[in-house]
Amino acid sequence: MSKILSTQLVGLIQRIQQSEEESIEESARLLAQAAIGQGRIYFACFGEMEGICINAEIGADPFSNFARYTDSVELMPADRVIIFTRSGQDAEALTLAKKLNEAFIPFTAVASEVASEANALSELAYTYISLKIRGGILPHPTNLGERIVMPHLIAGLFVYEAIKLEFDEMIADDDELE
């Protein structure tokens, strides 16, 4: 079963990389604006995606200019926000997205659904990255048709690391120009 799992995860990551490469680069560029402009980069992670905030804050290689978003944060024009949520239908994520949009604070969002007019989160976000997850990725061994293993956090961590690679490169390039 673990061989099937690894095959499915590799396929998922490849789909994200192939279809979201441009959005990942645009998102890194958006976040780099905060670092270059003396702003903070606020991470708003919902549900199990909180694991991404933990990694960005205290992982082996923390995210530069990281700050955890809370409702008490007063955002400045130079600040940027990245939202990680399992679903674009998440009420808390949508409330934050509407608040950011109304305040003209550029933000990026990462969620399972593909970008579309029906996906309010993708419509509100300055940049949007789809995790390409519609449900479980493995068939349940005992139930016909039911799928298990919800890889939202794994896919989210891949997107986070891809953004971080681009972001770090952009920040290094800016440092070299000074």
Image: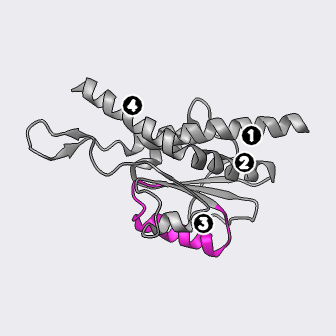
Side of 120 relative to 124 (left or right): left
Q: Position of residue 144 (x, y in %)?
A: 9, 44
Residue type pointed to by label 2: Ala
Q: Which residue is mark 3?
A: 72
Q: Identify the residue position indicated by label 4 in the image.
A: 10
Q: Is residue 96 magenta?
A: yes
Is label 3 or label 2 in front? 2
Q: Of circles 3 and 1, which is in front?
A: 1
Of circles 4 and 1, which is in front? 4
Label 2 and label 4: CA atoms lie apart by 28 Å
Q: Earlier in the sequence, mark 3 or mark 1?
A: 3
Which comes sooner in the sequence, label 3 or label 2?
2
The picture places residue 4, in percent across and down from the top left corner, at: 26, 28
Q: Which mark is residue 170?
A: 1
**Hey, which quadrant is residue 165 in on the image?**
top right
Task: Measuring from the top left, give residue 110's x and y in whole percent.
Answer: 50, 53
- Mark 2 sits on what residue? 32
Q: Amino acid at mark 3?
A: Ser
The residue segment tinted magenta is: 84-106
- Residue at 70 percent of width and 48 percent of height: 29
Q: Are marks 4 and 1 in contact (CB under 8 Å)?
A: no
* Dot 3 or dot 4, earlier in sequence: 4
Residue 167 image offset from top left, x and y in percent = 68, 41
Q: Earlier in the sequence, mark 4 or mark 1?
A: 4
| Image depth: mark 3 or mark 4 in front | 4
In the foreground, 10 or 18: 18
Local crowd size for mark 2, using a 10 Å CA cut-off: few (<14), some (14–19), many (≥20): many
Q: Tags 2 and 1 in contact by the CB under 8 Å rule?
A: yes
Tell me if 129 is positioned left or right of 146 in this view.
Answer: right
Q: Label 4 to label 1, Cα distance in Å?
A: 27 Å
Secondary structure under tag 3 reads: loop
